[in-house]
Image: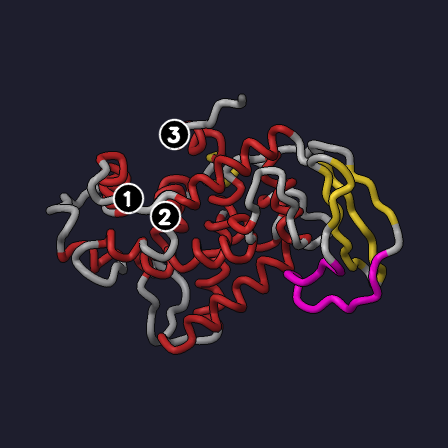
Amino acid sequence: MEAAPTPAAAETQHRHGGCLSARTFMPPGPVARCSGGSSQAAGSPDEASCGSPRWIGKSLFCVCIKRKGAYERICMNLTPVQEQRLQRLRHRMKVYFDHSRRDHQEALRALWYATYPDQELEGLVSEQWKDMGWQGRDPSTDFRGAGFISLENLLFFAKTFSASFQRLLQKQSGNQATWEYPFAVAGVNITFMIMQMLDLQSMKSIAAKPRTFVKAVFVQMLSEDEWAFDLLYCVAFLVMDKQWVEKNASYMDFNEILKSTRAQLQKELLLEDVMRIEDMPSYRLLC
């Protein structure tokens, strides 16, 4: 079985002059296109599949998509690498934050010092956490919606794209909205939004088929880069902030901003020349 990279290795792998390194995408499995899709109209990007995907054989799924006005059915094999990485990602999504676990405590401390490297942390329960945008003195209570992976996402963002992370946290440059969102809590909500968008938790087994083309595209990206989910999170945070500022949003607009962020991500993931997270137009916001 393929060894899972460590967070430190991931940071080294992705960092290149402050931006993520670009690598050539090699399709992990055969892709067959066949005509004969449904005449059902496609709505939002998340609904771009027409009809239900169908199994052709073991680890082979088909989804019907609309591109340039014509429907096509794309069939892909799930490779062993894809299955392994899906399993790991789904496992990460199932882990709840447990304040009694030492590794979870250390991850929370690591987030603090990645965010405020020159400021001593008084404790895992402290008024200091409010400065980062948690709702109260104990940040562990804010992880209930998305679990431990939302902390991992924030930590990945802070270590891999520290300049972008600090810019959003401190609003050190650029325009600001009249009312700024709570940074850390927004991050937890972004994790949950991406989990819903990709719908990976609905796959009851590793061999389960993606039900939308957005999910199928992400599975392909995951085979190229095991940290695709974390990278997508970083892009999503920048997209959300950009829309927030452009619309001069307030607290009451938060859910609508998340919806429009999701729609933008879906739109970019379905672009024909997007094979990796690095190919998404909004990725350049990170550099």
Q: Please, is residue 208 above or below residue 2 in the view?
A: below
Mark toward the start of the polypeptide (1 vs 3): 3
Judged left or right of residue 21, residue 18 is left
Q: Which kind of residue does numbered mark 2 sit on?
A: Leu
Q: Residue at x 83, y 53 (%)?
A: 72
Q: Which kind of residue does numbered mark 3 sit on?
A: Ala
Q: Position of residue 114 (x, y in %)?
A: 28, 42
**Disc 1 to disc 3, C-alpha distance:** 14 Å
Q: Position of residue 88 (x, y in %)?
A: 48, 35
Quarter of the figure with residue 120: top left
Tell me whether circle 1 and circle 2 mark residues in contact (CB < 8 Å). Answer: yes
| Residue found at the very far left of the displayed protein | 122
Q: Which kind of residue does numbered mark 1 sit on?
A: Leu
Which residue is identified by label 1? 111
Q: Residue at x 13, y 53 (%)?
A: 126
Which residue is identified by label 3? 8
Res 9 label: none
Task: Give the residues drawn in magenta, as a range.
Answer: 37-51
Which residue is identified by label 2? 154
